[in-house]
Amino acid sequence: MTDAPNTPLRADAERNRQRIIETARELYATQGLAITLDEVARAAGVGVGTVYRRFANKHELIEALFELSLTNLAEAAEQALADPDPWDGDTRLAEHACQRLAVDRGLSEVVIGRENDRERISQAAERMRTSFAAVFDRAHDAGALRPDATLSDLFATIHMVANFASFSGPVAPDAWRRYLTLFLDSLRGDREHLPLPVASLTPEQVSRAKQLLQQRHAPLD
């Protein structure tokens, strides 16, 4: 019985927390990770102190939002791995990833390395990368992909198409599907292809590129 007087307060606090999270999700999706906690508070219609009582800094809020988003991408890859056709699984995953990143600028930034020094983000990102690799490797081993295709090529395709979708979305929301099909068609393993002029990025180059990107955008707060 002693907890009863506090129940409305706890309910209000939870409503505020959900309002902050939903507002931040929308702001990060449309404007990217440069949004500050002050801007989140204003858009949510709550005091800055209310935001800071729930999230010590912006990194904690980003972690709360995007750990789940990365986990969802990993789960989509795990579902694609269950597709009996390796090529269909690979293309379905690429389409899902493009669709998610096209409407969420913040997620796109997280996937390419922003905030990957945060433990929960890093763990979720590693699960996602491992799951995507399993889908790609299965398609590659089945001969569905051209022999010189690499996982870096798949991620590059997803990011290029997602960036185009962000550009074209206001005037042609589905235009990105045309370019995803063109890119994926170039990865098919059942036809002749022109030789690729340069190698794909190595994991070390990808890691270094992410580090340099973080440096260019720091600080976030």
Image (cartoon, rainbow, N blue to C red):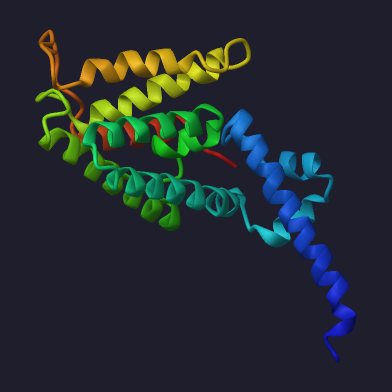
Most foreground residue, 48 or 19? 19
Residue in the picture at 56% in, 29% down? 103
- The N terminus: image quadrant: bottom right
User: Eyeballing the image, is 215 above or below 198?
Assistant: below
Residue furthest out toward the right: 5
Tell me where residue 145 appears, x and y as whole percent: 17, 26
Task: Count the marks.
Answer: 0
Residue 151 relative to residue 8: left or right: left
Residue furthest out toward the bottom: 1
Residue furthest out toward the top: 194
Residue in the picture at 52% in, 17% down? 174
Residue 128 relative to residue 170: left or right: left
Tell me where residue 156 appears, x and y as whole percent: 31, 25
Q: Is residue 218 in sight in this rendering?
A: no
User: Eyeballing the image, is 155 above or below 172?
Assistant: below
Residue in the picture at 87% in, 83% down? 4
Most foreground residue, 10 or 62? 10
Q: Quarter-wise, where is residue 8 in the image?
A: bottom right
Q: Quarter-wise, where is residue 152 in the image?
A: top left
Tell me where residue 40 appears, x and y as whole percent: 72, 42
Most foreground residue, 85 or 158? 85
Q: Is residue 124 in sight in this rendering?
A: yes
- The C terminus: image quadrant: top right
Tell me where residue 57 appears, x and y as whole percent: 62, 53
User: Eyeballing the image, is 24 above or below 210?
Assistant: below
Most foreground residue, 179 or 118? 179
